[in-house]
Image (spheres, rainbow, N blue to C red):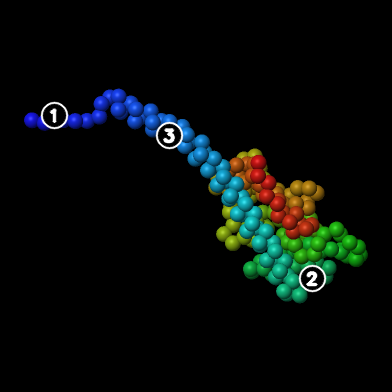
Amino acid sequence: MKKAQGFTLVELVVVIVVLGLLAVAALPRFVDVTESAKESSVEAVAGGFATGVLSARAQWEADGRTKSGINNYVDYDGTRFGLTRSVDASNSGTGYRDGYPVGSSFKNGNNVDTASCVFLMEHLLQNAPAVEKYSNDPSKGIKYLAQAINGNNVCRYTQNESNKHQFEYDIRTGKVTVKLK
């Protein structure tokens, strides 16, 4: 009769130690991948948002720079957007460039409020991530928190999962800037 063969206790311990060393070496790389994915996500959403801003402005240009009185507007993808204007009612310069989205109406002129920032995110992007106004206790499933900052000239969108990565949209220039932390 043949004697059954198997692994010795020493061989099993050596394999377990080697697997443990591999896990210790690989685990930090997987943790870093999660953070990298969050950074890539905010960069992608910001890129889509910038494209939406420029597409709305391009539509306004293609429509012949539509106005209602002194207010610029565009009907973009089935939604009416109020746009920035470079001159006010007295024909004085405002310091803004013409044609960048500020919200759903002209009520704020060249200013945005937090509700306008939420509106912009929801309507400039197709299949926009869930967004709500900035709070310390966001609703479940919310991906971005919006707030108007810098004298109501900038919309800031903070990624809820990381609560540190964000992008900002400056209505004065149409510039979208990503801030990773």
* Residue at numbered disc 1: 3
Decide which of 99, 4 is in the foreground and name it. Answer: 4
Point out the tag, 3 or 2, that comes first from the N-terminus: 3
Task: Between label 3 and label 2, give the one nearer the viewer.
Answer: 3
Percent of width and height locating residue 108:
79, 58
Distance Cα–Cα, label 1 vs label 2: 95 Å
10 Å crowding of disc 1: few (<14), some (14-19), many (20+): few
Type of residue at label 1? Lys
Mark 3: which secondary structure?
helix
Count of numbered marks: 3
Percent of width and height locating residue 94:
86, 59
Distance Cα–Cα, label 1 vs label 3: 34 Å
Point out the tag, 1 or 3, that comes first from the N-terminus: 1
Type of residue at label 2? Ser
Task: Judge whether 133 appears above or below 62 on screen.
Answer: above
> At 22% from the left edge and 30% from the top edge, which residue is drawn?
6
Which residue occupies the extreme left position in the image?
1
Relative to 137, 28 lies left or right:
left
* Residue at numbered disc 2: 68
Relative to 63, 38 lies left or right:
left
Percent of width and height locating residue 57:
72, 66
* Residue at numbered disc 3: 22
Which corner quadrant of the image does residue 81 belong to?
Answer: bottom right
Decide which of 14, 124 is in the foreground and name it. Answer: 14
Mark 2: which secondary structure?
strand
Distance Cα–Cα, label 3 vs label 2: 66 Å
Quadrant of the frame with the N terminus: top left
Task: Judge whether 62 appears above or below 134 on screen.
Answer: below
Percent of width and height locating residue 62:
72, 74
